[in-house]
Image (cartoon, grey):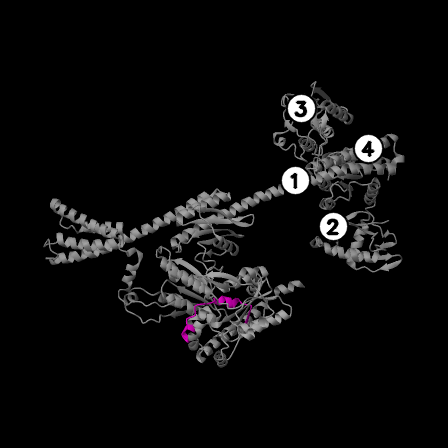
Amino acid sequence: MKGQRIVVVDDEPQILRFLRPALTAAGYDVVEAETGKQALALVATVAPDLLILDLGLPDMDGKDVIAQLRSWNTIPIIVLSARDRETEKIAALDLGADDYLEKPFGIGELTARIRVALRHKTHSEPAPSTIRSGDLVIDVEHRLVSKAERTVKLTPKEYDLLLLLASHAGRVLTHGALLKQVWGPAHEHDLQYLRVFIRQIRAKIETNEAEPAIILTEPGVGYRFVTT
Amino acid sequence: MPDDSRNNLNRPDPDALLGLANRAGRGKLTIFLGAAPGVGKTFAMLSRARIRKNAGADVVVGLVETHGRAETEALVENLEFLPRKQIDYKGRKVDAFDIDAALVRRPAILIVDELAHTNAPESRHPKRYQDIEELIAAGIDVWTALNIQHLESLSEIVAQITGVQVRETVPDRVLKQADEVILIDLAPEELINRLKEGKVYLPDNARRAADSFFRLGNLTALRELALRRTADRVDDQMVDFLKQNAIEGPWRTSERLLVCVGPDTLSEKVVRTASNLASGMNAHWIVVSLEQSDMVDDDPSRQMRIDALFRLAERLGGETRRVQGRDFVQEILRIAKREHVTQIVLGAPQRSLWQRLLRKSLTDALLEELSGISIHLITTEDQPTHDWFAPLKRRLAANRLKVRPKDVVTALATTAVATLGGRAMVEIVSLPNVSMLFLLAVLVSALRGGYFAAVLASVLSAVAYNFFFISPVGTLTIAAPHEVFAFFIFIAAALIAGGIASRIREQGKIAARRAAQTQILYDISSKLAGTVDQDAIVWTAVSQLNGTIQRPVALLSPIDGVLSLRSCWPPDTELGVAEMAAARFAYEKGEAAGAGTGTLPNSTLQFRPLRGPVGTLAVCGYGMDGHALDPVEERALGAILDQVTIAFDRAMLTTRSVEDKARLERERFQSTLLSSISHDLRTPLATITGAVTSLKEFGDRMPAESRRDLLLSIEEEGERLSRFVGNLLDMTRIEAGALEPVRDWVDLGDVILDSVARVRRIWPDLDISTSIAPDLPLVRADSVLLGQVLFNLLDNAFKHGGGEPVTLYAKFDARSVSLSITDLGRGIAEKDIDRIFEKFYRRGKKADGRKPGTGLGLAIAKGFVEAMGGTITVESPAVKRRGTRFTLRFPIEDALKDRREP
């Protein structure tokens, strides 16, 4: 895992000032860029393993960088944003960003997200046959879910939704993306479906429904399946 | 699946549902209907009110006459009464129903007796049913009582049956639109008994009439009318219910009547008969008046008769329409087709033998063209009179045959000239026939004077021709037979030519009048076209209207939600209470009000609403002077008001779009402001959090140098954050007016040196040169604030100075101490210079490759300087088309005076 190359794109020198030593200390190769154009050029030339991208860039919108990159590259992208506007994050995620972090953030959180994103990149080919989160086990092959050794009965839709979240464990999936994949494009905006189903699934798999530990809510953005 | 319901054909009739929806928000009208006075309507109404009151309903009595009857009095004992209004009427006080008190009190149910009552002249509405309609519209349920003989459409029948002419009538629509009709029935014999026992109250002056009215036959007939009307209503309700609930027929196919009327006397009967036919068939009926489109009808009385007919038809529940066209038959057919008319009602006028021979009647023409539509012909009741002169009398009565002295003079003069000219010609050229000359005289008279002058000139010419030229000359006898023949041909030719010429003249006049009208419209539309200023529109409208109708004109429109007078002509036109009330009514209800209308007729002006696409925009009032506008003025008024409405609507849209744009701009500014503040706060926070967590997690794996740099960045960002928060707080203090400078004696030199030192600590590479005049007087200022101002200005110079040297001068003259800071950067663009002191205003992001500031520094500097009584100005370019100079000035009077004192 060591020696993986990360391109950090941010126009605030202060941010780069701590990201550089911290990520270097964490064992990554850090390449810096200040503008969107530089970032696109760097991705093409230095072939990084991951991109950390600030959405507010001086020359172009961070979202446009994602859109352009995604037309030819599948490199994991983690978005940093000082903006707390949900629509920005959702747009970035829907354009193909893998995850987002809101400033200010702790470096531990960032490195955890980096690890998740990189793991997805390396293990993207063979799908795991079982997914675990605490005492929850999803047997993908047999479509079986058990909680603390006891079988959990899920409806087909509930199962599809849970599997979708679990197979992107650690990453946030937007409401739109979940609805589109589970219910089809026509229901992309029927948020109430999702809320009801998430509640039902949580009732069946969470130890304490009031404090969900497996399916976390990202307010205004989507849901995240946590494996640990 | 929900889609299945769409295929269901048994859907409720949309019109029926709309009818229901229109009732939402309105109060309910309950009418206690009786056949005659004394059947117990008031008693029934009050008994019911008492029951509702005891059940907890908010029942209030607006107006009830108990006529001192004990049994009725007992009923009203614990009911709440509205106070009555005292109205002065012909010197004595009259108790009247107070509609405003009712609107203020807003009870759930209000009882107002006597629906057909006519209000005192000073009241808001002439009729009580109009008061009640307003109450209903305001959402109050009203209970009222009505005797069947007061119903408009029955007044004629009642008069026929009972021989009593009913004056107080209520339009049929009131009963038709009532939500509930409760029939109070009493057998006629019993009613007569009650009357004999004195249980029925009648005013003294009605006693005599009562005996002939309260006869068994009359009462039975009235009872039948009341029962029938109620039964019709129940039937209507049943049909409505079926429609609303999508219950399949058999519904009655809806009959539609087309009623053709004109200004003749028969038309009133046509309308009344059509109304009865329509209510019997439960049919929709449309009344049309036909006007010749190529004739201007100058006779106002004809128009007024049509208007009166229309009002009657509307009261009876018909729809009215004016139709202009050349071919009446085709027009009628067109309407009949478009409106799916099933029956046509028209009057059969008495036609003379000549008319019958020469012209096909409208009826015959219609009969030839129509198929599938039946025709009702209404005949007069008068004995047909054979007045041979009727058409001639009519023509003479018409305006154009009015005998004017001018016409007589014209005819006489032209004939005299022709005679003299003829004599002269006979002498000179021995013209064999001078009749041509007289024909010319007739034509000239016709063209100058009109039809009457032409006829008169024909007669005079014939006499003169005969007398002076036909042998034997000097007598009125004619010798030669062929001269007799020629003479009569001359008369015929003169009359025909005169008639044609006068018609040409009439048409010329009409064309000229049309042209004038078109000119007025063109003028006003071209004046209004380019205007989006409401005041200009209002002024143009008022002056043009006043010029057109020659009456006082006023235009009102709402300003800040209150209807106010915008412009009027003549300028001293005053609007009294009645006028303002009428104007408000017209504005709120969107219908004409004031003089000549049914609402507030004692206002001197009539007010018309200007209705745009989104509601009433304004109201226009004009003086009535006792008579209505003639049709030409009416048309001109309508056309001008239409133009003004369009212009007004456009002006309002323009104003709104400007406001919208400004608001959008403001919102956009606020949103960028918010995001920029959040960015400025978050970036240092993100750096501090990031650096601290980095040290915590990976500190032991980092080289010492990196650790030191992270710690340093934490310190710097902390300071940055603190500065920004400090700026925000300062700005808040300035804006809240909470800044209280501690004004003390300050040595400017000290403050300058201190600030420069502070700036140098932060930006060691900034090149600052200072030049401070010796003997600089002390300034009364707050040294902390002043230091902050200098720091902000130097900070600004550093950010925008492009690394060039910054110079700082402090000098003084007789009046002030001034301090200037000049940088040699790119300067400020002209478009920015006015906004440079606005808060959160930043020049182009990263203009000089450096980080932009918070956009607060200069705003704070200005706020502080002004709080200390100084001024701050900016000039750019400052030196050789480069750089920016900020200059602070503090008045020296303070300084000098105080320097001597201590």
Q: CA distance from mark 3 to mark 2?
A: 76 Å
What subunit carries mark 4? Answer: B
The residue indicated by pointer 1 is B669
Element assignment for label 1? helix
Q: Residues within 10 Å of mark 4 (few under 14, many from 20)?
A: few
Circles 2, 1 touching at the beta carbon (< 8 Å): no
Q: Nearer the viewer, mark 1 or mark 3?
A: 3
Give residue A177's mark. 2
The reply to whether residue B887 is visible in this rendering is no
What subunit carries mark 2? Answer: A
**Along the line of sight, the residue nearer the viewer: B366 or B664:** B664
Instruction: Specify the segment rendered in magenta.
Output: B157-181
The residue indicated by pointer 4 is B715
The reply to whether residue B784 is visible in this rendering is yes
Q: CA distance from mark 2 to mark 4?
A: 42 Å
What residue type is disc 2 on?
Answer: Ala
Marked residue nearer the N-terminal end (3 or 4): 4
Q: Position of residue B280 (x, y in %)?
A: 47, 72
Element assignment for label 4? helix
The answer to whether dots 4 and 1 both sit on one chain is yes
Q: CA distance from mark 1 to mark 3?
A: 46 Å
Is B164 in the magenta? yes
The residue indicated by pointer 3 is B897
